[in-house]
Image: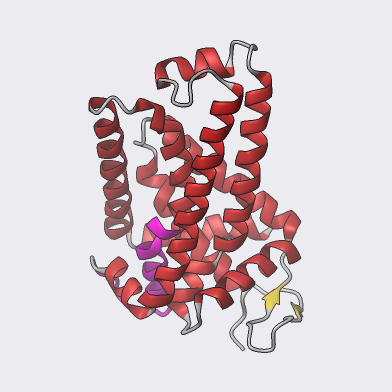
Amino acid sequence: MDNTAAADSPHQEDPRVNTITLDHPWQWLAKGWQDIKTAPFYSLRYGAMIVLISGLIVFLTIIGHLTFLIPFLTAGFFLMAPLLAIGLYQMSAHLERGEPVSSCQALEAFRRNQGQLGVAIGFLVMTMQLWILASVFLFIMLFHDPFPPFSSFIPVVLLSGQHMALVIALTLVGAFFAACAFCISAITIPMLIDRQVDAFTAMRTSVRAVTHNWVPMLLWATLLVLIVGAGLLTLYVGLFLAVPLVGHATWHAYRDLVPRD
């Protein structure tokens, strides 16, 4: 598949960014599905591991009477998803080169550029913490309880109609942090395991890839939210397939967006 001419980079050392079309996100999903079919044992086992970890975290919040954290943990899942799929990127890279995959793909990927991956992870964690702090501040300012129980969060806060200012503020703040997180992480982790570049170069390239192709990347972000959201709404069972699909597809997104000169 040919991409159109690459956009010039504002930094001489930064990789160029390709121009893509609205067809590309669908092609990435198709390639991701093909990767699952090529290595189903490793891909789906990876998805099963994510399901088990997610279920365990929610179980611990319930028995610890910390259910008010569930909305924040859900938002955090979307933010940290690029990191959670690191092993899937490595699997796709091996499949692309015609090499066998194995059970240690995540560890192998992390070792390739672990220092810079740590910097990128730090930025994602910082973004998630700022999101949580902003949300707690809004609850303090616009609601009588900064930590409402999850059982009353939806009927009282979201559906009662009595706290529309809070709902609108939470939506706008969430959209802002989600957009920032998507821009800095859309292709950052795949790029860091594929190339010996620093985290700031990878994040700059990710931001340029998103802003230069904002319409197809908006479609891509919407597809990611719908697929992962469907996995979350099925009590995490759907993540068994959703995580491998979007993980493999994200690798192909990176390969189309950032050419190898």
The segment highlighted magenta reads: 83-102
In which quadrant is the N terminus drawn?
bottom right
91 is within the stretch colored magenta: yes
Query: What is the total number of numbered labels drawn onto the structure image?
Result: 0
Residue 145 relative to residue 65: left or right: right
The quarter of the picture where residue 34 lies is bottom left
Q: Position of residue 58 (x, y in %)?
A: 31, 33
Q: Position of residue 109 (x, y in %)?
A: 35, 73
Residue at x 51% of width, y 61% of height: 250
Q: Nearer the viewer, residue 88 or 79?
A: 79
Q: Position of residue 6 (x, y in %)?
A: 73, 79
In which quadrant is the C terminus drawn?
bottom right
- Does 213 sit above or below residue 134? below
Q: Position of residue 20 (x, y in %)?
A: 71, 66
Residue at x 27% of width, y 69% of height: 107
The type of colouring in the image is: secondary structure
Q: Nearer the viewer, residue 141 or 206?
A: 141
- Does 213 sit above or below residue 242? below
Mark yes or no: residue 21 visible: no
Residue at x 41% of width, y 16% of height: 151
Residue 135 relative to residue 97: left or right: right
- Does 242 sit above or below residue 208? above
Mark yes or no: residue 256 visible: yes
- Does 108 sit above or below residue 175? below
The quarter of the picture where residue 248 lies is bottom left
Residue at x 68% of width, y 28% of height: 168
The quarter of the picture where residue 110 lies is bottom left
Majority secondary structure of magenta residues = helix
140 is within the stretch colored magenta: no
